[in-house]
């Protein structure tokens, strides 16, 4: 990639303060893009933005603090960008969250906020920035889906359903835009070494303590797919096999397997007095 060709171009990244979002920021800065970094943590964003601007001599790095789980957040972010006079060439809808536990026990208000964050906000940001991209017939959108987009996800019921939505939305949008200069890429990573499991209350599950992908590797695969205009990418061989297997296995078998992975591991010492499921899920 010619870094000089990207000078003057801007990427907006949600959830940019850690995990995949932070790795995307590093990759785009290295490629010469100016940055708009969006997350709740102002100090983390400032530190990351200053570091990347200095390291890569970027023209500008904008920091926008926003709680994207709030209904008005997407429009507020869009208006702040428009006020600055910046055109967004690439939109990275990365921010997302989940909650672990039985649906009949989890908190409804928290789940409504997750649905807003994982579905409504990315859709609204895509709607707003896509209209600007169409005016110049050029642009790229990346939507963060998941390996669970392909299968039912017991004990992460709402998260799995939102990610199935993201994949379907992205691939339908890809078809609608096939005659334009705008591409949409859905990224479907598997369990990864980020703060996701801890924040979801799932740190003691089999999935969280199994083989995890590194966020920099996932982000690099996603970045390359986005730049190549691919509609979908499943980073990692293990995850590719799992995604392919979802086309063969019955849904109930997939659900049973996912439930096993999302159950909490018990203490392996059968004589231990603390040999019981972890109770700090929420």
Image (cartoon, grey):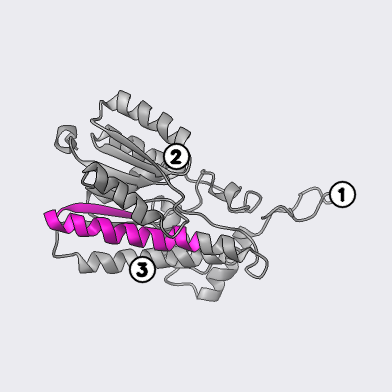
Distance between mark 3 and mark 2 Cα atoms: 27 Å
Residue at left offset 23%, top offset 68%: 175
Q: Is-magenta flag for residue 129?
A: yes
* Residue 194 placement, left or right of 226: right
Secondary element at image label 1? loop
Real-space Cα distance between discs 1 and 2?
Answer: 40 Å
User: What's the mark number on residue 168?
Assistant: 3
Is residue 245 visible in the rendered structure shown here? Answer: no
Q: Residue at x 31, y 24 (%)?
A: 55
Q: Which mark is residue 17?
A: 2
Q: Could you tell me which secondary element the residue under label 2 belongs to? A: loop
User: Badge 2, how many Cα within 10 Å: few under 14, some, many 20+?
Assistant: many
Q: Position of residue 30 (x, y in %)?
A: 28, 32
Residue 33 falls in image quadrant: top left
Residue that appears at 83% across and 51% down: 270
Q: Which region of the structure is painted magenta?
A: 114-142
Residue 273: mark in rendering: 1
The residue positioned farthest toward the top in the image shown: 54
Q: Residue 145: give x, y in percent of width and height.
A: 41, 58
By secondary structure, the bulk of the magenta-drawn segment is best described as: helix
Q: Are marks 1 and 3 in contact (CB under 8 Å)?
A: no
**Does 228 sit above or below residue 126?**
above
Nearer the camera: disc 3 or disc 2:
2
Horizontal arrangement in the rendering, residue 7 relative to residue 244 (left or right): left
Instruction: Tell me the crowding category of disc 1: few under 14, some 14 to 19, or many 20 or more residues within 10 angstroms, Cα based.
Output: few
């Amino acid at each position: 990639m010619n870094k000089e060709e990207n000078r003057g171009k801007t990427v907006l990244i949600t959830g940019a303060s850690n995990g995949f979002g932070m790795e995307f920021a590093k990759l785009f800065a290295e490629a010469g893009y100016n940055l708009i970094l969006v997350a709740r943590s102002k100090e983390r964003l400032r530190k990351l933005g200053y570091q990347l601007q200095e390291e890569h001599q970027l023209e500008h790095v904008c920091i926008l603090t926003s709680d994207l789980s709030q209904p008005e957040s997407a429009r507020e972010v869009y208006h702040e960008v428009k006020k600055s006079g910046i055109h967004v060439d690439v939109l990275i809808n990365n921010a997302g969250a989940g909650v672990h536990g039985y649906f009949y026990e989890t908190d409804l208000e928290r789940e409504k906020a997750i649905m807003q964050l994982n579905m409504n906000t990315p859709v609204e940001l895509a709607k707003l920035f896509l209209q600007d991209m169409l005016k110049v017939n050029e642009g790229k959108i990346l939507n963060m889906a998941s390996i669970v987009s392909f299968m039912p996800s017991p004990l992460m019921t709402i998260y799995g359903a939102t990610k199935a939505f993201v994949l379907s939305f992205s691939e339908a949008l890809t078809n609608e835009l096939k005659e334009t200069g705008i591409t949409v890429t859905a990224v479907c990573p598997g369990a990864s070494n980020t703060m996701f499991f801890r924040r979801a209350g799932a740190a003691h599950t089999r999935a969280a303590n199994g083989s995890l992908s590194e966020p920099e590797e996932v982000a690099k695969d996603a970045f390359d797919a986005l730049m190549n205009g691919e509609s979908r990418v499943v980073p990692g061989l293990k995850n590719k096999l799992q995604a392919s297997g979802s086309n063969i296995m019955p849904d109930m078998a997939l659900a049973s397997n996912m439930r096993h992975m999302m159950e909490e591991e018990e203490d392996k010492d059968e004589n231990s007095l603390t040999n019981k499921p972890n109770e700090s899920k929420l």
